[in-house]
Image: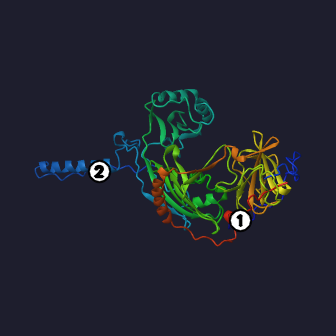
Amino acid sequence: MTNNAEAPAASPPPGTDASPPDDPIDDVPPPFSEEGQEPEPQLEAAPEPPAEADGGWSASRKRTYAAAGFVFLATVALYGGLRHPSGEVAPSLAVTTTAATPTASATATNAAADAGAPEADARPRTFRVASYKGDDAVELVEATVGKRTLLAAFAKAGLSHNESARVLKAFDGQRRFDKPGPKDTFTFARDKASRKLLAFEYEVSPTEVFQARDTDGHLVAKKLDLTVERRRVTAGFLVADGLKAAITQASLDADVLKRLDDALDGHLELADIHAGARLRIVATEARVEGVFSRYETIEAVEYLPPRNNVAPLRVYAFGEGKKAAHYDAKGQRPYHGGWRMPIPLARITSRFNPHRMHPVLHRVMPHNGIDFAGSTGTPVYAVAPGTLKFAADSGPCGNMVQILHSNGLVSAYCHLSKFAPSLKAGQKVEGRQLVGYVGQTGRVTGPHLHFAVKKGAAFIDPLSLKMGGVQVLPKGDRDAFGEKKKEMDALLDGIALPTAPVTDADGGAEADDVNLDEDPDDDK
């Protein structure tokens, strides 16, 4: 399957009024005239030494056995950890955090038999309540707090009032539960026969877990001291049956989709990654107690589109804390205002101008919007949430979509070649939702998007809204970014990729290759 499948036909979507709305904005018919557990080390008993001839041990032999015993115990303590019968590492020897970053590689150049989530190092060192799973004598309940109070969440999960009070009392001085998060989870184990609460666990995040266990009839609570390891992983894969399937086949966890969406935000929409595309990823994963937890960040990603006449894209993570973001090779990153650009990173070829000279009619006529360069078929997205008002042929504006927003503003997207599937008048539209594709329908001299915004009876300059834009790295950060980019490029280049499928190279003219007049536009 390639990326040259036909998009939806340009006929008006079902349920859409084929004629323009009743409130034309000027002398053009349409409303807009513009556009488990690790094996425990077993301490084997030392063999009985042969008796001395005189019925006892010599002093030298005693010293030899004592030294051997000390070495054995020291070795167990160092490599395996002394353990309680419960399976927990003795607190004095517990390792809390590791920051090792050995490189692991997962590629999709062949179909792995064990495709799916990253391989787990199934050797938990700390007792977890979930270890009761599979015990027929124990009831195990897992739940999320949600938008309830904590006591309400406990009750819904099946904890009695007395059990809830017992749990909260156990955590006195350990954890306050007055402001639980809606995504916080808890797990408890209860003996089915006696209904006795055996253990309770409250998880704020994979690395912040509080636990209470029954000890001689009392719940003893503590915050778990968990071993966390961070590792760099790389993957290269071909998208054949969808991005999610490709990620699974590359032995990556589906959690990487969220991180990939963040990394490509503004640069590329995940919905636009179609069959035939290839990706390389460098990511950092966190493992808690040897088990995969989540991907912390995408350090770099390369996108190779299905058609070779479209430039590849590489983005790189740079910065710390709130300043961390993903920049392209030029050190640029999109940023978002309350309104989004209808075509991310597109070049503006004509601005809002009430007194411009029309390029086709050669007379002074207002340009009631802005024009974005784009080749035919470039996706166009809603700039903000709203309600679909109109989607049909509108005459000079060509195929047009109008969206009514909650603040009374109406946005219009003109000259579209095709509409997005299943658009219907009256339906709710989300911000960044696909609404159509760039074209040159209507009165135009080349493919582009004419975007307009109207408030009441008057057009306003769309750029006067708080829209997204592009931020360039400050000069002081460019050397450091260059070093980071150099490191990531070397890693990306070293990731094997499947062979690109043969596709139709004719993907439409690039934006910079289109001979646009100064103001190719829709007009009255």
Say left or right for 48 vs 151.
left
- Residue 439, located in which quarter of the rendered image? bottom right
Quickly name the residue at label 2: 75
Label 1 or label 2, whichever lies nearer to me, is 1
Which of 127 and 495 lies nearest the eye of the viewer? 495
Question: Is 39 or 253 nearer to us in this picture?
Answer: 253
Which quadrant holds the N terminus? Answer: bottom right
Query: Which label belongs to residue 514?
Result: 1
Tag 1, which secondary structure?
Answer: loop
Looking at the picture, which amino acid does disc 2 mark? Answer: Thr
Spatial separation of the CA atoms under disc 1 and disc 2: 72 Å
Q: Which mark is residue 269?
A: none
Quadrant hosting residue 267? bottom right
User: Up-down: is 156 above or below 356?
Assistant: above
At 68% from the left and 66% from the top, the residue drawn is 513
Q: Residue furthest bottom?
A: 502
Q: Which residue is drawn at 47% across and 50% down?
A: 476
Judging depth in this view, the residue of 41 and 74 nearest the camera is 74
Horizontal and vertical percent for residue 350?
72, 55
In the rendered view, does 158 fall on the left or right side of 360? left
The C terminus appears in which quarter of the rendering?
bottom right
Q: Which of 59 and 56 is in front in this view?
A: 59
N-term-proximal mark, 1 vs 2: 2
Residue 84 located left or right of residue 360: left
* Residue 468 horizontal/vertical position (percent): 64, 48
Using a 10 Å C-alpha cutoff, classify the residue at mark 1 as few (fewer than 14 neighbours), some (14 to 19) or many (20 or more): some
At 62% across and 60% down in the image, what residue appears? 245
